[in-house]
Amino acid sequence: MTIVEENKITPGQLMFFIIQTQVGVGILYLPSRVEAIAKGDAWISVLLAGFFAQLIIVVMWDLARKFPTLTIFDYMHLLLGKALGRIVHVLFAAFFIFQSSLILVLFADVIRDWMFTETPKWVILSLIVMVCAYLVQDSVQTIARFFVLVSGLILVLILIAAYAYSQADFLYILPVGQAGLLSIVKGMNETMSSIYGFEMILVCYPYVEGGSKGKLKAVLFGHIFSTLLYTFMVFTCLVVFTQLELKIIPQPVLYMIKALSFSIIERPDLYFLSIWVIVVATSVMAYLFMAVKGVSRLFGQEQHNKVVPYVTIVVFMIALVPQNQAMIGALLKMVSYLSYIFILGLPIFLLIVHYSMRIFRKRRALA
């Protein structure tokens, strides 16, 4: 596969690509989910999960730089062989499709609860899917430019949330370490499903200008920003709500902002959601882009835009299936388990295969 030079992005654009992929619907649910496990130490779980994820990023980067002109959908065939490589290719592309669908499901769930309670689910999903598909059919450079353009909205979200410190009580998180090491580690596990997105490097690596170290720095800086943002949101919710309140509030960030009082703004939560919709859309676009890239390479298509309509329809149909919280929970759990296989396990396995093949070739050459 050849990458057109005009289609490349800068390391800075890659950084925003990572940030927009990571920051999405999970920012609303994460505080209550991690607090249910790690109590007042939930913010520590988020920080430790971010640190652990950096180790995975280094593994992915080391794998990607071995094949600087190829995406993972290309070099997995070289490492695993034609038959096994094709099977893993199909499963990996399906994983990104399920990831896109899960984000859409959670997105529609929030929008229906807070804004359009009587609007059919398929209407909400179709609107966001059409917008995402429209942008994804363009080049990676265009997508990256859009992500950079809307990144300023994240700062607005931070400023709105920061106003909640006028009602904060830092005694809620004391004593530090109250949950115990085991609970903090379990909280890390819950956090990981929200901070995924750094796997974008496996697909975007050949599209980025510059050397391998510059690409690694871009991904790490983007990931660090996302980790600090999630930590900030979780910490803010911990010092605003009591543990009892967090147990019964599914989306504490929205409830926290709704409770804020501004002299000229009514229902600040709706303004927050209006901005958050765009942030979530970029996350859907990123995973849809990876899914489309996987499917297009599976069928030998150089131009990914030809398969965008078909992949989008599949993502849309899957998102329509969950009709209650039990089904949404099942989809969330399934994607969480798959993430350990494809985001944590697969890159490590492929890197081991690569080094094993290189050692075998050296020994064969010396024989």
Image (spheres, rainbow, N blue to C red):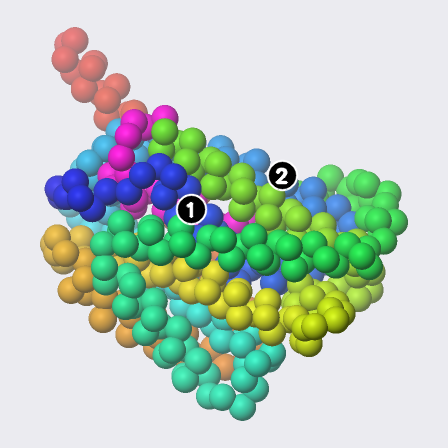
Q: Secondary structure at mark 2?
A: helix
Choose top left, top right, bottom left or bottom right for residue 345.
Answer: top left
Extreme-bottom residue of the structure: 118
Query: Dot 2 surroundings within 10 Å: few (below 14), some, or many (20 or more)?
Result: some
Marks 2 and 1: CB-CB under 8 Å?
no
Residue 364: in magenta span? no
Q: Is 181 rendered above or below residue 287?
A: above
Q: Position of residue 63 (x, y in %)?
A: 32, 33
The amino acid on which the numbered mark 1 sits, given as a three-letter code, is Phe
Quadrant containing the N terminus is top left
Q: Secondary structure at mark 1?
A: helix
User: Does residue 188 appear in the picture of this structure?
Assistant: no
Q: Is 226 rendered above or below residue 338?
A: above
Of labels 2 and 1, the one closer to you: 1
Q: Which mark is residue 119?
A: none
The amino acid on which the numbered mark 2 sits, given as a three-letter code, is Leu
Choose top left, top right, bottom left or bottom right for residue 264.
Answer: bottom right
- Which numbered disc flags the more N-terminal residue, 2 or 1? 1
User: Which of these two is toward me, 217 or 299?
Assistant: 217
Q: Which region shows up in magenta?
A: 192-213
Dominant SS in magenta? helix
**Which residue is labeled 2 in the image?**
48
Name the residue: 57% across, 44% down.
227
**Which residue is labeled 1 in the image?**
16
Q: Is 367 rendered above or below residue 151?
A: above
The answer to whether residue 116 is left or right of residue 310 is right
Q: Position of residue 126 (x, y in %)?
A: 37, 79
Name the residue: 39% across, 73% down.
128
C-alpha gap between disc 2 and disc 1: 22 Å
Quadrant containing the C terminus is top left
User: Does residue 88 appear in the picture of this structure?
Assistant: yes
Name the residue: 16% across, 40% down.
5
